[in-house]
Image (spheres, rainbow, N blue to C red):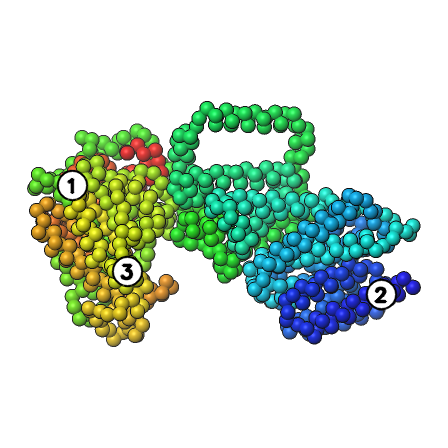
C-alpha cells in the first residue's frame, strides 16, 4: 500500500511539472521553479518501484532514447528526461552505492558536465548527469531513519542557508543574461563562456538547495520507526565543509589579489562576481584542484597562500612606486625592490618580523606531528581526472579568443593597469607567462664588469666623449626634436594626385630617411630608439619597451643634455599615462612633461585631436620661457588614425583612379594631416629664424599610417605601390613602407644628411654631435654602426651577422643599460 501511495504521489508531481514544462515554455523563473520541483521528484525517485522485467526495461529505455533523438534539435522535454534518468540511475546506482566517495564525486561530475556543455557548439542535455547527486542522496536516505540531534538540525539548516544564499547571489548575477533559461539543463545550445561561469554554480546551488530542503522536510514530517537503519547526517559534515573551504580559499585568494590591483575594497566587492573575475576564481579552483589531487589537502593551501601573499605585496609595491601591476619579468628589478625595502626598514618593523618568524618556528616545532600529518602528500586518482578536465576547459576559454572575449577577457598588445583590471590577476598572468620568452632577455655571453670597461675604453679613450664637429657659437644651442604622428611621405605612392605640395617644407629640409621599427602603431618604440640610441631589433616582436622594461633611470639624449646644463621638456598632447610616458620621461631625464592637460580640447583641436599648430605654439612658449639652453621633445597627435570622415573641411584634395570612395576619404584625411604637420614645421622654422639664439630643429615621422582597418591597412599601399629606389639599393625592399622622412634645420650651422636609410637610433648621435656636448663613450658606437649596419630592424635582423664584434658590443651595451648592472652608467 505504501509503495502504491509513493508511486501515485511521484507520478502526480511528474505530471504537473511536465505539463508546465510543455505548455508554459520560455519564462526563466518558471524554468528555475521547474528544476527545483524536478529535484524534489528526483529526490524521492529511489522510492519508486515499477517492478518491470528486463524486456520492458529495454523497451522503455529505447522509447525514451528515440523521443530524445527526435526532439533534441527542437526542444527536449522534462518528462522524457525524468523517465530516461530514472531508467539509467536505477540500474547504475545500486552497483556504486557501496562506495563512500559516490556522493561527493557526483557533485564534481555535475559541475564539470554543465561547465563543459556550455562551451560546446551543439545541443547537449546534461540533466541526467547534473541532477544525479539528488538521486544519489535520495537513495542513501530511502527506507532509513534520520538521526535527529541538535547538531544534525543545525547542520541541516546551515546547508539550507548556504545553498539559498549562493542560489540567490548567482541568480541575481545571471539576470538579464539568458542563463536562467537553461537552468533546467535539458536544452543547452551554444551558451558560451558567459553561461559557463554562471550556470554550473547556479546549478550547483540549486541542487544543493533542493537536497537541503527535502532533507529538512523528511526530518520534519517523518517519525522514527523501527524499520530500516539509522542514517547519520554528521558523516556528511566533513565533505560539505571541504566543499565550502575549497571555494572559500579560491574566492578569498582571488579577492585579495584583485584588491591589491584595485586598492579599493568597495570596488573589489562590486567586481568580484563579474564574469571576468568569476572566471579567475574558477581558474584558481582548477589549479587548486589539480594540486589537491596530486599533493593532498595541506600543501596546496600553503602554495596558494604563498602565491597570494607574494602577488599582493608585489602589486602593492609596484602600484605605490610605478602605478602599474607586477609583471613576471619584474625579476629584473629585484635589486630595486631590495633598495626600496631598505628605505622602510625600522627597528619596530625588524622586531615585528623577527617576532613573527619566531612564533612561526615555535608553532612548527610544537605541532610538528600534526602539521606533518596535515601536509603529508597524498595522490587522489579519483579527483585527478576531474581536476584535469576542469583545468583543460579553463585553458580552452583562455586560448580561444571568441570565448574569452565573452567574459571581457582579451590579450592586449598594451600592458598595464587597465589590462589586468579587465582580465583579472590570474588570466592576465597566464597571458604574461605564455609570452614570457618575449620579455626575458638572457645575459649575453661574456657580459661582465671588465667586459663593459673594455667597451667603454674602446669607444672613447678619454672618458666622456665630445662631439667632433664643435658648434660655431659660444652659446649652447637650443634643441627642438619633433616626432610627428604617422608622418609618412604618401606622395611616394603611385597614382595619387594632390592639389597642393603637402610635404613642401619636409622635402626642403629633408636630411635622409629613417627605417621606423614599427608600422601602423607602436609609436613608443620609434621614440625609444631616437631618444636612447638603442634598438628594439634584438627584442621579441610586439614588445613595447616603455611598458615592459623601463622602470629605472635610463640614459638618453635628454639626460645627457640635462647633465650639460640644459632644461629638458617633453610635450605630447595626449594622456600622459599612455605608453607609461608620465613615468618613463622622468627616467629619461626630462624635467617637465606637458600632456593633453596643458592644452585646450575645446579650442586647440583639429579633428578629434590637438592640432600640430597648437603643439608648435606650446614648443615656442616653452622655449621662450627657458632661462637655460633648452631641449624640447614634442610628439604630435593630430594625424593619429582613424582617418575616415576625420575633417569637415580640407585645404588639400586627392585624386586616384584606383581607390574607391572610402579609400579616397581615408587618404584625403591623412593627406590633410600631413599637410598640417608640414605647414606647422614651416611655421616653427619661420619663427625661429627671427631668434638670435643658436637653434637646432629635428623632425621625423614615427611610422607609416594605417590606411584602413586594423586588419587591412595595407590595402591602399598594395593597390597603389611605390618605387622606393633607396630601399631597393640597400636591399631593404621589405621596409619600403617603414621608411619615414627625416628633416633638420639650424640657424647657425649646416646639418649633414644621412647618406643612406638609417634606424631612428642614429638621430641620438646626430643631435649630440651637432650640439657639441659631452656624452657617454658608448654613443660612439653609433657612427660605426651607421657605416656597417645603418638599419637594424626586426624585419631584417636575420640577415645580420650576430657574431660580428660590433653587433656583439652593441647588444652588450644595450643589455647593460636596460637589464644589467649598468656598469656604463
Marks 3 and 1, how far apart at CA? 31 Å
Q: Which residue is mark 1?
A: 627
Q: Nearer the viewer, mark 2 or mark 3?
A: 3
User: Which quadrant of the rendered structure holds the C terminus?
Assistant: top left
Marks 1 and 2, how far apart at CA? 98 Å
Q: Earlier in the sequence, mark 1 or mark 2?
A: 2
Q: Nearer the viewer, residue 769 or 36?
A: 36
- Residue 620 lies, with reference to residue 474, above or below; the image says below
Q: Earlier in the sequence, mark 2 or mark 3?
A: 2
- Residue 590 lies, with reference to residue 707, above or below; the image says above
Q: Earlier in the sequence, mark 3 or mark 1?
A: 3
In this rendering, position of residue 681 left or right of residue 41? left
Residue drawn at the location 66% of the way across and 31% of the way down: 372
Residue drawn at the location 61% of the way across and 55% of the way down: 169
Q: Count residues near mark 3 (Cα–Cα under 10 Å), then give few for <14, some for 14-19, many for 20+.
A: few
Q: Which residue is mark 2?
A: 7
Q: Nearer the viewer, residue 582 or 88?
A: 582
Q: Which residue is mark 3?
A: 602
Q: Count residues near mark 1 (Cα–Cα under 10 Å), then give few for <14, some for 14-19, many for 20+.
A: few
User: Which quadrant of the rendered structure holds the N terminus?
Assistant: bottom right
Is residue 283 something that shows in the picture? no
Tell me which corner region of the image, top left, top right, bottom left or bottom right, holds residue 803.
top left
Residue drawn at the location 49% of the way across and 40% of the way down: 312
Amino acid at each position: 500500500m505504501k509503495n502504491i501511495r509513493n508511486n501515485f504521489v511521484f507520478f502526480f508531481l511528474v505530471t504537473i511539472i511536465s505539463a508546465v514544462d510543455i505548455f508554459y515554455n520560455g519564462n526563466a523563473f518558471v524554468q528555475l521553479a521547474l528544476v527545483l520541483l524536478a529535484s524534489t521528484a528526483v529526490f524521492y525517485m529511489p522510492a519508486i518501484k515499477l517492478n518491470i522485467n528486463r524486456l520492458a526495461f529495454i523497451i522503455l529505455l529505447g522509447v525514451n532514447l528515440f523521443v530524445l533523438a527526435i526532439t533534441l534539435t527542437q526542444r527536449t522535454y522534462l518528462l522524457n528526461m525524468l523517465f530516461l534518468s530514472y531508467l539509467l540511475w536505477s540500474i547504475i546506482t545500486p552497483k556504486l552505492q557501496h562506495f563512500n566517495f559516490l556522493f561527493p564525486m557526483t557533485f564534481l561530475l555535475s559541475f564539470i558536465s554543465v561547465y563543459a556543455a556550455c562551451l560546446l557548439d551543439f545541443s547537449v542535455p546534461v540533466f541526467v548527469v547534473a541532477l544525479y547527486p539528488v538521486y544519489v542522496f535520495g537513495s542513501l536516505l530511502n527506507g532509513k531513519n534520520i538521526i535527529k540531534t541538535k547538531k544534525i538540525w543545525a547542520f541541516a539548516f546551515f546547508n539550507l542557508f548556504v545553498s539559498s544564499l549562493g542560489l540567490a547571489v548567482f541568480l541575481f548575477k545571471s539576470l538579464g543574461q539568458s542563463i536562467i533559461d537553461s537552468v533546467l539543463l535539458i536544452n543547452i545550445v551554444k551558451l558560451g563562456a558567459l553561461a559557463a561561469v554562471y550556470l554550473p554554480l547556479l546549478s550547483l546551488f540549486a541542487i544543493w538547495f533542493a537536497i537541503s530542503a527535502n532533507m529538512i522536510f523528511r526530518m520534519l514530517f517523518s517519525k522514527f520507526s523501527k524499520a530500516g537503519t539509522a542514517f547519520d547526517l554528521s558523516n556528511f559534515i566533513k565533505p560539505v565543509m571541504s566543499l565550502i573551504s575549497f571555494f572559500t580559499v579560491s574566492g578569498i585568494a582571488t579577492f585579495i589579489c584583485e584588491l591589491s590591483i584595485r586598492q579599493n575594497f568597495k570596488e573589489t566587492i562590486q567586481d568580484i562576481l563579474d564574469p571576468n573575475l568569476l572566471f579567475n576564481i574558477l581558474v584558481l579552483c582548477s589549479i587548486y584542484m589539480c594540486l589537491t589531487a596530486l599533493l593532498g589537502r595541506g600543501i596546496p593551501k600553503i602554495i596558494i597562500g604563498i602565491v597570494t601573499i607574494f602577488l599582493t605585496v608585489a602589486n602593492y609595491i609596484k602600484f605605490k612606486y610605478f602605478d602599474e601591476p607586477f609583471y613576471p619579468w619584474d625579476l629584473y628589478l629585484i635589486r630595486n625592490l631590495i633598495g626600496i625595502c631598505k628605505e622602510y626598514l625600522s627597528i619596530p618593523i625588524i622586531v615585528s618580523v623577527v617576532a613573527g618568524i619566531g612564533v612561526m618556528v615555535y608553532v612548527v616545532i610544537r605541532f610538528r606531528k600534526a602539521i606533518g600529518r596535515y601536509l603529508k602528500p597524498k595522490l587522489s586518482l579519483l579527483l585527478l581526472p576531474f581536476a584535469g578536465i576542469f583545468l583543460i576547459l579553463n585553458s580552452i576559454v583562455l586560448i580561444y579568443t571568441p570565448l574569452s572575449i565573452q567574459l571581457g577577457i582579451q590579450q592586449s598588445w598594451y600592458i598595464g593597469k587597465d589590462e589586468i583590471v579587465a582580465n583579472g590577476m590570474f588570466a592576465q598572468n597566464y597571458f604574461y607567462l605564455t609570452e614570457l620568452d618575449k620579455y626575458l632577455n638572457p645575459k649575453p655571453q661574456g657580459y661582465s664588469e671588465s667586459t663593459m670597461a673594455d667597451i667603454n675604453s674602446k669607444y672613447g679613450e678619454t672618458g666622456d666623449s665630445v662631439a667632433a664637429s664643435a658648434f660655431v657659437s659660444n652659446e649652447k644651442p637650443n634643441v627642438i626634436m619633433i616626432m610627428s604622428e604617422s608622418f609618412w611621405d604618401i606622395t611616394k605612392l603611385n597614382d595619387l594626385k594632390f592639389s597642393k605640395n603637402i610635404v613642401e617644407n619636409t622635402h626642403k629640409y629633408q636630411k635622409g630617411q629613417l627605417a621606423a621599427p614599427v608600422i601602423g602603431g607602436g609609436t613608443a618604440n620609434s621614440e625609444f630608439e631616437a631618444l636612447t640610441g638603442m634598438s628594439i631589433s634584438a627584442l621579441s616582436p610586439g614588445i613595447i619597451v616603455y611598458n615592459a622594461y623601463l622602470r629605472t633611470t635610463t640614459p638618453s639624449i635628454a639626460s645627457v643634455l640635462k647633465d650639460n646644463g640644459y632644461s629638458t621638456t617633453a610635450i605630447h598632447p595626449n594622456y600622459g599615462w599612455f605608453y607609461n610616458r608620465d613615468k618613463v620621461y622622468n627616467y629619461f631625464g626630462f624635467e617637465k612633461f606637458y600632456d593633453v592637460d596643458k592644452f585646450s580640447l575645446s579650442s586647440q583641436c583639429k579633428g578629434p585631436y590637438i592640432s600640430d599648430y597648437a603643439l608648435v605654439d606650446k614648443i615656442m612658449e616653452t622655449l621662450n620661457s627657458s632661462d637655460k639652453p633648452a631641449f624640447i621633445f614634442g610628439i604630435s597627435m593630430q594625424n593619429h588614425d582613424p582617418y575616415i570622415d576625420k575633417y569637415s573641411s580640407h585645404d588639400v584634395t586627392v585624386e586616384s583612379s584606383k581607390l574607391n570612395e572610402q579609400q579616397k576619404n581615408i587618404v584625403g584625411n591623412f593627406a590633410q594631416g600631413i599637410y598640417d604637420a608640414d605647414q606647422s614645421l614651416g611655421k616653427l622654422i619661420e619663427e625661429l629664424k627671427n631668434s638670435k639664439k643658436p637653434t637646432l630643429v629635428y623632425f621625423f615621422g614615427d611610422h607609416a599610417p594605417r590606411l584602413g582597418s586594423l586588419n587591412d591597412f595595407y590595402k591602399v599601399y598594395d593597390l597603389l605601390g611605390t618605387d622606393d629606389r633607396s630601399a631597393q639599393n640597400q636591399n631593404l625592399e621589405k621596409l619600403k613602407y617603414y621608411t619615414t622622412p627625416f628633416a633638420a634645420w639650424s640657424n647657425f650651422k649646416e646639418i649633414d644628411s644621412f647618406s643612406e636609410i638609417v634606424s631612428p637610433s642614429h638621430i641620438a648621435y646626430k643631435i649630440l654631435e651637432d650640439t657639441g656636448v659631452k656624452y657617454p663613450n658608448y654613443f660612439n658606437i653609433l657612427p660605426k654602426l651607421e657605416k656597417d649596419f645603418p638599419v637594424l630592424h626586426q624585419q631584417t635582423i636575420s640577415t645580420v651577422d650576430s657574431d660580428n664584434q660590433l653587433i656583439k658590443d652593441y647588444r652588450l651595451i644595450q643589455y647593460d643599460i636596460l637589464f644589467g648592472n649598468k656598469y656604463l652608467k
